[in-house]
Image (cartoon, helix red, strand yellow):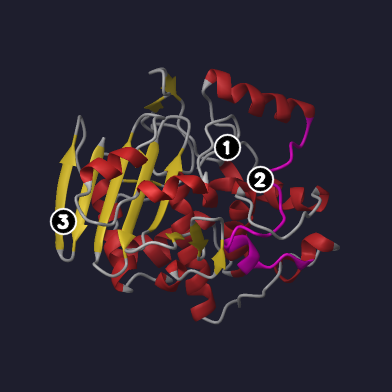
Amino acid sequence: MAAAKIDGDDVTWGGVGADETSEFEIGSITKTITAALFADAIERGEIDEETNLGEVWPELDGEVAEVTLASIATQRSGLPAQEPARSFGDGLATFLSGYIHTDPYRGTATDLVDSLKDVDVGEQEPEYSNFAFGILGQALATVTDSSYGELVRNRITEPLGMTDTYVPGSAEGLSHGYTASGLPAAPWTLGGTAPSGAIRSTAHDMSIWLRATMDGSAPGATSIQPREDYNESDRIGWAWLTTKDRSPNLTWHNGGTGGYRSFLGFDPKTSQGIIVLADSAISVDDAADVISTSEASVATRHSAQVHGDQAGAHS
């Protein structure tokens, strides 16, 4: 486990069997980077909030073509939580991944987009969707004529100096984490769904990301601004959740893959933040409570139910 506490310009590091340079899968904290790319693309005039999937991919029609990128970024698109299985074999492999601890995501970016033709769009109400965020990232890649990994590198990690943060192209040579029971868990690269949770990083680089997001210098930092109610405890910006009805507020996201867990959060008013990364599928949200000594307690955050440890889900 590695952790960082941010207090203004000061960063304090800590770790158990790891340090600020150790690499982890950050899981759904990836969504905060995808959301920043969305906000940045708007600022560049490449898209706007109401750009819909049909404008990105003209071959789409019906309700799915009308789904807006902003509705995806606020987790209320009506798209399913996970990509529909392309075949019985794919569905079975995804199901079994939870038992044999493999990456449940197999389709390419093209497969992911093709699957939109077969989805039923539900009500536009808050529902956490890894599938939708995969679509958001691939839409941004399409609009900018690049891959998602190239977009992350060119617009986020290189400008900010996050030299150890990247989207893996394959699982070859990647370190693995462990299940909650201590068994090895294969690395997750997530295929076409990478924009929802595939990024690998370090506590050092995540401190750069969090500080730049807090002070507004990160590309697309406006993504943190709350825009909609998400549940009884939180409002949601583009990916980022912010606690409500309490003082101080906390803006946060967590993450989890087959063998890793992660958390980052900050108090927008005090510029205090916390990052916790672990190579085990045991929640680190409570660890963030213990490590942080600021008033911005993360304890009120849990009702958002972002986590998903079952096969085919990640937080």
Label 3, on which residue? 11
Could you say which quadrant of the image residue 50 lies in?
A: bottom right
Mark 3 lies on a secondary structure that is: strand
Taking depth in this image into account, of 78 and 183 the one nearest to the observer is: 78
In percent of the image, x 49 and y 80: which residue is there? 43
Chain-order first, disc 3 or disc 2: 3
The alpha-carbon separation of the residues under discs 3 and 1 comes to: 32 Å
Label 2 neighbour load within 10 Å: few <14, some 14-19, many 20+? some
Residue type, mark 2 in image: Ala
Residue 115 percent across, percent down from the top left: 75, 48
Q: Is residue 285 above or below residue 160?
A: above
Location of the N terminus (image quadrant): top left
Q: Say if mark 2 contacts mark 1, CB within 8 Å.
A: yes
Relative depth, front residue between 225 and 185: 225
Q: Residue at x 56, y 19 (%)?
A: 99
Q: With respect to residue 249, does 93 lie above or below?
A: above
Q: Are marks 3 and 1 in contact (CB under 8 Å)?
A: no
Q: What residue does disc 2 label? A: 81
Please state if 162 lies on the left or on the right of 35 as rendered: left
Q: Is residue 150 visible?
A: no
| Residue identifier under label 1 | 313
The residue segment tinted magenta is 66-87
Q: Given the image, on which type of amino acid does mark 3 rest?
A: Val
In the rendered structure, does residue 297 fall within the stretch colored magenta?
Answer: no
